[in-house]
């Protein structure tokens, strides 16, 4: 890019264009436009609101007052020839800025690009004393890749003020996001005023106390403090108007039939038992579920009546996820209804429930969106599917010619950890670093070109079990939301992670002035295990190309400049950090302990792939000398499998003497993760014989379950015989028992390093 300078009263320099999301076409030209109080603002009448929005931004952020004089000009123009309704053209010459768009949306997005060409001081009212600004001359032709570009926010687990919701929406609008998915009802709290049912505000909106720490911590402890809140209909109208001015549509989510414990606590007759229950005080999935009675449907229809009046958008999200069928199986009314309607089972009863509510919602002029569980038992006729359990739900729905929105937990769940640093704030689990978000392709590979037309776009999800404050929420959401914004807006041909990081570093200066508590992992060190014919090495990397890495081994002074991969000829501890030219440390320390053992560098295979959300390190993570985190299972060392038996085969390059095999399993039952009940091993010896053994694993409540086996006791008397292959079969725990979180579902298995000595 070309840097142009110009001399003004303040001797200002034009900002090098670093726009996020990166425009589809951008041409830097010679010269600068001088923005000052001598600049004239004009607009086509239909773009008046956008032009005045821009005027307000300029005048609030500087001493510049746009007027009707004519040294140079800025014009907002309607251009019907632009094909995309959200597309725009931005042309800056020395005497004119021309913004052309087909609609208000396109003009607003043009303003957002122009905004990033202005000094960051403009982001804070009355902080810039500038009276004349140089803006780089350029031409941009831009339009979004996807029509749905969303961010979600769960206000059920933790409640956030109207002022914060507006801040969140404003940040979304800067990134050209166009949809805010507002998750308003949950087991732990009902957050929207429904005038016909006052107990929703009086009872369902408040819980008696809240879980302290992580759900996996046993025994559970609570804070003993009443917690809650709700948005009045007046406040919701205010937020809807605020979002609309920023070209954002709000989709309200009213969960059904599950995640409804708060509502049932207010009106017990909505459940199958009719018994009084409390609003949930901890996280997870609960058995309380709406009973498909006529009175329940009347309640939900009344709720929809009021919701539909508040939200002018096309969609209402009805949830449909994580709806346990225990109550329905035990309910005489539900079983009678299944027989009456000729339904096969409780899954088809859920389809009956969703389809009936869809018809009513359609009658209000709205369409439904549901999580991918609404596919179970058959898909409602006009439903849009939001695919969160991977991409299979999206593929299935698209092949049935239903619209889909991608939000897989593997790439779009911003409640997951974003760094494997030990000092990261508490999160639900998982591991989703910034680069993985940026790598996301919302079009599943299994879809044909024709089927991919049903993919509307993608969305980042922010579940707030462990986000009690706005500051914590911002830390978890940003900058991952920024990466996703570029995924859904920009053409894949323009995407480059290194370039994105450079632009992000500048964009973060705007976030600083907007008081956004974003996570800054731009200067973190990452390590990668390497194997070659000659030796084992460990490579250190940083996303920063302008700063240097210094490291130390085994607690020595951190003074060695990193130049090439570290040779691993013994077990070692590595500590490293990024430093600037003044030798000031940037970011956090990186620390890794590498345990050299006999499986490292050998050939490993699995009978199936780990779940894509828990496969950051790939199969080599099982034999790379690095153990997973002791407190969380989502880093790149733990591999997660969803309910399947796992078979691991390690083939040794040369016959190898094996004495012990050790590994460990995560055992967070509250998160559906169980250690296996037994392990089967088979060892092939160099003389062709095979040794097999099975070892049971003791049932324990510990978070980590160790497995240790002394192999030498199974060898023949000749202790010099060596093995050529080890096969480890790990049967899944099976079905989670009744009364436990996830009851009736298959348990997850999480496996750590397999250490062979």
Image (cartoon, rainbow, N blue to C red):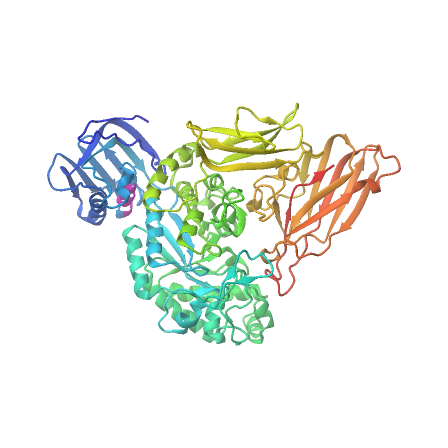
Q: Chief secondary structure of the magenta span?
A: helix
Residue range corresponding to the magenta coloring: 105-112
99 vs 297, left or right, is left
Residue 194 screen position, x and y as percent: 37, 69
386 vs 311, left or right, is right
- Residue 337 seen in render: yes
Q: Could you tell me which residue is drawn at 62 percent across and 61 percent down?
A: 744
217 vs 314, left or right, is right
Q: Could you tell me which residue is drawn at 41 percent across and 61 percent down?
A: 184
Task: Examine the rendered structure and indicate whether residue 70 appears above or below residue 222.
Answer: above
Q: Could you tell me which residue is drawn at 72 percent across and 47 percent down?
A: 707
Task: Examine the rendered structure and indicate whether residue 464 appears above or below residue 135.
Answer: below
Q: Is residue 109 magenta?
A: yes
Q: Is residue 420 magenta?
A: no
Quadrant in which the N terminus appears: top left
Of residue 325 and residue 627, the one placed in the foreground of this image is: 627
Of residue 203 and residue 220, the one placed in the foreground of this image is: 220
Residue 310 screen position, x and y as percent: 32, 63
Residue 112 screen position, x and y as percent: 29, 42
Quadrant in which the C terminus appears: top right
Of residue 642 and residue 446, the one placed in the foreground of this image is: 642
67 vs 110, left or right, is left
């Amino acid at each position: 890019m070309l840097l142009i300078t110009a001399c003004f009263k303040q001797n200002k320099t034009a900002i090098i264009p670093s726009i996020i999301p990166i425009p589809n076409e951008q041409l830097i030209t010679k010269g600068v436009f001088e923005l000052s109080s001598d600049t004239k603002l004009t607009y086509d009448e239909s773009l008046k609101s956008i032009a005045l929005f821009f005027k307000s931004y300029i005048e609030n952020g500087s001493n510049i007052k746009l007027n009707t004089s004519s040294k140079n000009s800025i014009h907002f123009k309607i251009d019907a020839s632009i094909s995309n309704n959200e597309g725009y053209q931005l042309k800056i010459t020395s005497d004119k800025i021309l913004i052309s768009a087909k609609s208000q949306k396109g003009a607003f997005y043009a303003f957002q690009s122009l905004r990033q060409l202005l000094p960051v001081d403009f982001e804070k009212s009355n902080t810039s004393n500038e009276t004349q600004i140089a803006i780089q001359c350029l031409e941009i032709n831009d339009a979004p890749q996807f029509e749905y570009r969303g961010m979600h926010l769960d206000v059920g687990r933790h409640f956030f003020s109207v002022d914060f919701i507006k801040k969140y929406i404003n940040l979304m609008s800067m990134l050209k996001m166009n949809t805010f998915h507002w998750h308003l009802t949950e087991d732990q709290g009902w957050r929207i005023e429904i005038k016909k049912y006052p107990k929703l505000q009086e009872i369902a909106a408040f819980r008696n106390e809240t879980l302290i720490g992580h759900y996996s911590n046993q025994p559970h402890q609570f804070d003993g403090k009443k917690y809650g809140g709700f948005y009045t209909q007046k406040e919701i109208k205010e937020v809807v108007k605020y979002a609309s001015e920023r070209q954002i549509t709000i989709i309200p989510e009213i969960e059904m039939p599950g995640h409804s414990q708060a509502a049932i606590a207010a009106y017990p007759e909505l459940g199958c038992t009719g018994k009084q229950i409390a609003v949930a005080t901890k996280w997870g999935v609960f058995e309380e579920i709406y009973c498909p009675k006529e009175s329940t449907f009347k309640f939900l229809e009344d709720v929809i009546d009021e919701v539909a009046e508040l939200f002018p958008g096309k969609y209402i999200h009805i949830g449909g996820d994580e709806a346990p069928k225990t109550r329905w199986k035990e309910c005489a009314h539900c079983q009678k209804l299944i027989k009456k309607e000729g339904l096969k089972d409780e899954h088809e009863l859920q389809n009956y429930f969703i389809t009936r509510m869809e018809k009513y919602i359609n009658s209000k002029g709205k369409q439904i969106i549901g999580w991918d569980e609404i596919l179970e038992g058959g898909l409602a006729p006009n439903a849009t599917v939001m695919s969160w359990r991977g991409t299979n739900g999206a593929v299935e729905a698209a092949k049935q010619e239903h619209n889909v929105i991608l939000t897989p937990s593997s790439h779009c769940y911003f409640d997951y950890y974003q760094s494997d640093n030990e000092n990261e704030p508490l999160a639900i689990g998982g591991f989703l670093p910034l680069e993985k978000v940026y790598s996301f392709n919302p079009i599943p590979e299994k879809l044909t070109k024709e089927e991919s037309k049903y993919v509307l776009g993608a969305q980042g999800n922010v579940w707030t079990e462990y986000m009690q404050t706005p500051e914590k929420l911002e830390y978890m959401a940003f900058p991952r939301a920024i990466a996703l914004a570029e995924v859904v807006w920009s053409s894949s041909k323009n995407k480059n992670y290194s370039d994105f990081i450079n632009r992000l570093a500048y964009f973060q200066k705007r976030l600083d002035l907007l008081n956004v508590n974003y996570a800054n992992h731009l200067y973190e060190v990452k390590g990668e295990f390497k194997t070659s014919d000659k030796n084992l090495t460990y490579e250190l990397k940083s996303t920063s190309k302008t700063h240097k890495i210094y490291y130390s081994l085994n607690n020595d002074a951190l003074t060695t400049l990193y130049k090439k991969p570290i040779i691993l000829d013994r077990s070692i501890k590595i500590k490293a950090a990024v430093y600037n030219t003044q030798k000031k440390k940037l970011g956090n320390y990186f620390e890794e302990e590498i345990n050299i053992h006999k499986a490292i560098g050998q050939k490993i295979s699995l009978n199936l792939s780990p779940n894509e959300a828990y496969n950051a390190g790939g199969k080599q993570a099982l034999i790379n000398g690095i153990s997973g985190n002791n407190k969380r299972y989502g880093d790149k060392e733990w591999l997660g499998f969803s309910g399947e038996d796992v078979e691991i085969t390690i083939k040794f390059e040369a016959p190898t003497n094996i004495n012990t095999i050790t590994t460990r399993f995560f055992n967070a039952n509250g998160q559906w993760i169980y250690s296996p009940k037994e392990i089967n091993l088979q060892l092939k010896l160099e003389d062709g014989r095979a040794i097999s053994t099975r070892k049971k694993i003791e049932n324990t409540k510990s978070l980590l379950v160790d497995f240790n086996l002394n192999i030498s006791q199974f060898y023949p008397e000749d202790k010099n015989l060596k093995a050529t292959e080890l096969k480890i079969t790990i049967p899944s725990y099976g079905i989670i028992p009744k009364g436990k979180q996830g009851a009736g579902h298959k348990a997850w298995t999480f496996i750590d390093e397999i250490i062979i000595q």
